[in-house]
Amino acid sequence: MAKTEAPSLVGKLETEVEIKASAGKFHHMFAGKPHHVSKASPGNIQSCDLHEGDWGTVGSIVFWNYVHDGEAKVAKERIEAVEPEKNLITFRVIEGDLMKEYKSFVITIQVTPKHGGSGSIVHWHLEYEKISDEVAHPETLLQFCVEVSKEIDEHLLSEEEEVKTTETLETEVEIKASAQKFHHMFAGKPHHVSKATPDKIQSCDLHEGDWGTVGSVVFWNYIHDGEAKVAKERIEAVDPEKNLITFRVIEGDLMKEYKSFVITIQVTPKHGGSGSVVHWHFEYEKINEEVAHPETLLQFAVEISKEIDEHLLAEE
């Protein structure tokens, strides 16, 4: 006899969730970094591990640990479809708790930008076949999806606020001097930097604390872009083993254009040879979009690095 499936065993459930985050960012949480979903929704999802393939590619397999209906559960899923231009991804459950009650279970998540406004709509679509009539429709799982969506939205918005306009610029300068000696110029005796580069840095005075100690405050007089400027900086980190020092600008000319400005200088010995590499790293938040990125200041850092190097070699 031909087997006939009762139509009631096959079902579809769907819902929509309005969110404030962009469609692309929400989609990327499931397509690009589902292992971050647990950060957004730790009460519901504990982890997502990649078992085969690559994140967000068709045929790849991911493994979820989640809590649903008060119970710890697992789901092994194969990615069946990914359409970045539609912000769509489809997962087919192939192993785990859902397979105890369903012959098949397919979850599609599509995110569409809202018409005429910011934010997006997350469309969840569950397609399944129950193993028997006794099995409930997965309505509590759909509610679970709604809750996870809202928590991911909150997570994405808080991330946006944190990194709203924080940006970085970095460069490396090769020098002949040793890593320790160069580091010591900024950590131990920044008041000597003006001797090495007098046309760029006029002075560095200690305002609070001791040279090269965390929490201490130093005051620089320097010339940048042809203008005399000042910067009051607090030392935020000093790591002698890594020849690293971090300064946070707390007052001065840079604060006219940046909400925050942090400068890290790390010097590493060159592999298999004499000399070192000075790594300059700027992390900053502009007060508005009109402000330029501090590229000329990065060039200034390169120039003073070379002049300090010459000064250290002459001292030797």
Image (cartoon, helix red, strand yellow):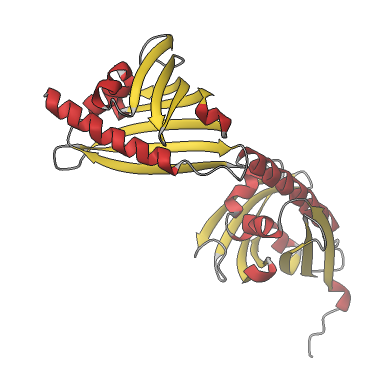
Give the side of residue 300 with respect to residue 23, left or right. left
Q: Position of residue 310 (x, y in %)?
A: 18, 31
On screen, residue 82 above or below 5: above
Q: Is residue 192 visible in this depiction of the protein? A: yes
Residue closer to the observer: 294 or 118: 294
Give the side of residue 135 with respect to residue 73, left or right. right
Q: Position of residue 157 (x, y in %)?
A: 70, 44
Q: Is residue 188 visible in this depiction of the protein? A: no
Give the side of residue 214 with respect to residue 70, left or right. left
Give the side of residue 106 with respect to residue 179, left or right. right
Identify which residue is drawn at 25% across, 27% down: 182
- Residue furthest out toward the left: 316
On screen, residue 41 above or below 202: below
Identify which residue is drawn at 45% across, 23% down: 230
Identify which residue is drawn at 82% across, 56% down: 17
On screen, residue 40 above or below 193: below
